């Protein structure tokens, strides 16, 4: 079970997700003149992580046919 979880996590490419979330956080600070609301920040980072992870998983699925 633990190995399966690790495989799912590696499928989402967490290092790339980290970089995308850093840029999203930077965008939040640039877009607001003051500190962004905590709820908005958590929502943007959570949604961004899920969207990027899902996109990476789909990319892996599509690339399996080309190799």
Image (tube, rainbow, N blue to C red):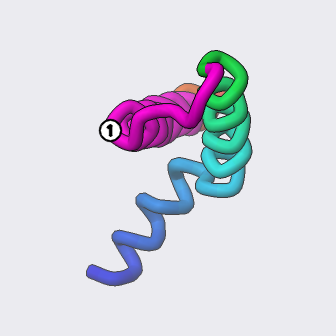
Of 7 and 36, which appears nearest the observer?
36
Left or right: 61 in relation to 30:
left
Q: Secondary structure at mark 1?
A: helix
Kindly indicate the quadrant of the structure image that contains residue 44. Answer: top left
Q: Residue at x 60, y 20 (%)?
A: 32
Place of residue 64 in the rendered image (x, y in percent of width and height, measured from the top left): 59, 37
Sort mark 1 into few (<14), some (14-19) or many (20+) by Cα contacts within 10 Å. Answer: few
Question: What residue range appears in magenta?
Answer: 33-60
Q: Quadrant of residue 25?
A: top right
Counting from the top left corner in percent of width and height, residue 6 is at: 45, 72
Residue 42 falls in image quadrant: top left
Nearest the eye: 65 or 51:
51
Pointer 1 residue: 39
The question of residue 23 being in magenta is answered with: no
**What residue sits 55% from the left and 26% below the top?**
62
Is residue 49 shown in magenta?
Answer: yes
Is the residue 12 above or below the residue 26 in the image? below
Q: Residue at the location (45% across, 37% down)?
A: 41
């Amino acid at each position: 079970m633990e190995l399966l979880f690790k495989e799912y996590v590696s499928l989402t490419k967490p290092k790339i997700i980290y970089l995308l979330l850093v840029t999203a956080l930077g965008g939040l600070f640039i877009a607001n003149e003051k500190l962004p609301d905590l709820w908005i920040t958590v929502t943007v980072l959570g949604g961004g992580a899920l969207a990027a992870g899902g996109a990476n998983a789909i990319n892996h699925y599509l690339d399996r046919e080309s190799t």
